[in-house]
Image: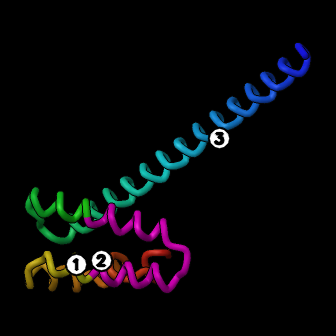
Amino acid sequence: MKKIVSIVVLIMAFGFSANAQSTVKLEADSKSKEQNVKEMAYNQLRELSSVVQLSPELKDDFLNLFMMRNEAVNNTKSYEEKAAIYERFGQKMLSGLSEEQVKKLAENKELYNKLTNLKYSMK
């Protein structure tokens, strides 16, 4: 009887330790994904700021917009859905800019396409 109880306890202890390790790994993966989303958003904001003059409030708004877009794209599987997300967020980004800022951005075709079109951003 003692052997059976000790075997059951060992099996349960092993099971708990295995679950704890997988949970830690999942948390680490989600933190690295979150860090990549932030880094990408900061890079995109830096590129946009180099072409268009932005106020601090507008920079915060665009940073949030880029982070939301990057997170949505990372959570989507199909290319069509990713392209639709890029188009939708690209329209939101352009609507936040004045006409003069949009013209300046449109003059830099490479950056304009990179920020508004998935096909160009993947290059």
- The residue carrying pointer 1 sits among few (fewer than 14), some (14 to 19) or many (20 or more) residues within 10 Å by Cα, namely some
- Please state which of residues 22 and 53 is positioned toward the viewer in this rendering: 22
Q: Residue 116 placed where, x, y %?
A: 33, 81
Examine the residues drawn in magenta and state their main secondary structure: helix
> Which residue type does callout 2 highlight?
Phe
Classify 10 Å Cα crowding around label 2: few (below 14), some (14-19), many (20 and above): many
Q: Which mark is residue 102?
A: none
Q: Residue placed at 44% from the left, 54% from the top? A: 36
Q: Which residue is mark 3?
A: 22
- Do the residues bearing badges 2 and 1 touch, measured as CB atoms within 8 Å? yes
Looking at the image, which residue is at 39% across and 65% down?
A: 70
Give the image location of residue 77, x and y in percent.
Answer: 55, 74
Give left or right: position of 102 versus 20. Answer: left
Q: Amino acid at mark 3?
A: Ser
Q: Nearer the viewer, residue 82 or 106?
A: 82
Q: Secondary structure at mark 2?
A: helix
Give x and y (percent) for residue 16: 68, 31
Q: Quadrant of the N terminus?
A: top right
Q: Is residue 58 above or below residue 107?
A: above
Question: Pointer 2: what residue?
Answer: 89
Secondary element type, mark 1: helix
The stretch of residues the image draws in magenta is: 65-90
Quadrant position of residue 46: bottom left
Is residue 44 inside the magenta stretch?
no
**First in sequence: mark 1 vs mark 3:** 3
Above or below, comparing residue 100 to residue 50 in the picture:
below
Closer mark to the observer between disc 3 and disc 2? 3
Which residue is labeled 1 in the image?
A: 92
